[in-house]
Amino acid sequence: MISQFIFDREEERRRIDQFLVKRRPFLLFGPSGVGKTLLLGSVVFEFRSVLYCEDSSTANVVFRSLAQSLLRRESPRAKKTFRDASAIATKSAVSLKGIVMDALREGEYSIMLDHLKRPSYSLASAVREIMSWGSTPVSAIARSSHMEDAGFLQPLYGDRSQKCEIRNFDDTTADHFAREMIKRRGLSGSNIAEFLNKVLEFSGGNPGAIITMVDMARYPKYRSDEHIKISPLYIDYRMQGGAAR
């Protein structure tokens, strides 16, 4: 999500905060552009014990990210093993995993896996091992709670109380958000009211889609004097893979 402010997400933010305070693993899910990473970032970095993995594509990538986070947090095990971040790259996957697992057992950490990409069986096995051996809660972020997005991690969050859904805005909230974004971007036009209505229709209440179209409307190619060329803008938006969610 492009915006740098949180809009009307206090309930979801409080719930994420409670998961982290209680050190409970959870699955945060919602469509692309809904603002999962932005919302998570507004909470998770208040907790020094949370190790955030921006890329969770493979187990090896996750362990390298965890090693870097542990070193930044001055984990005794990580500091003893790595003189600096560059030393992490010299370790084999097996060696790195052992070091990370030992470090996790020495402290009360939580892990956050963002941007899951159909996680494999091997990644799920590594997560189970972390949760059982190190007693470290592992939470994940995905587009949905279904198998195609959460993959083999899905059974780890089988309880409904472990799932936190971030939804697109309802019509009223989407309208307020779009107006706020138009104001913040300083967007104007002779047909601004029509543009607003079309953005709400095309976006389906997805905040990322709203922001993208508002930003596109500032480009010269989508303007004729003070008129916003709505149809060409939306066609390009769709061609860029920005279908409303």
Image (spheres, rainbow, N blue to C red):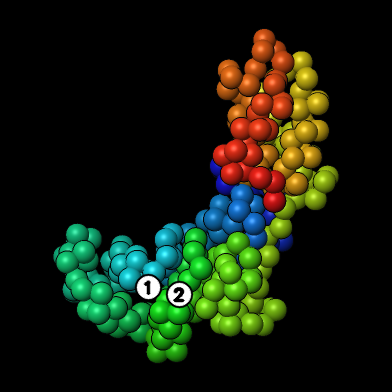
The local secondary structure at tag 1 comes to: helix
Q: Position of residue 36 (x, y in %)?
A: 59, 57
Q: Which mark is residue 120?
A: 2
> Depth-wise, is mark 2 or mark 1 nearer the camera?
2
| Image height of 28 relative to 4, above or below | below
Please give the residue where the numbered disc 1 appears in the rendered image. Answer: 59
Residue type, mark 1 in image: Ala
Q: In this image, 79 relative to 53: left or right? A: left
- Disc 1 crowd, CA 10 A, few/some/many (<14, 14-19, 20+): many
The front one of 164 and 120 is: 120
Q: Residue at x 71, y 61 (%)?
A: 11
Above or below, 175 relative to 95: above
Kind of residue sitting beneath label 2: Ser
Residue 78 spot, x, y in % from top left: 25, 72
Q: Earlier in the sequence, mark 2 or mark 1?
A: 1
Residue 67: in sight, yes or no?
yes
Residue 174 sits above or below residue 135 on the image: above
- Contact flag, marks 2 and 1 (Cβ < 8 Å): yes
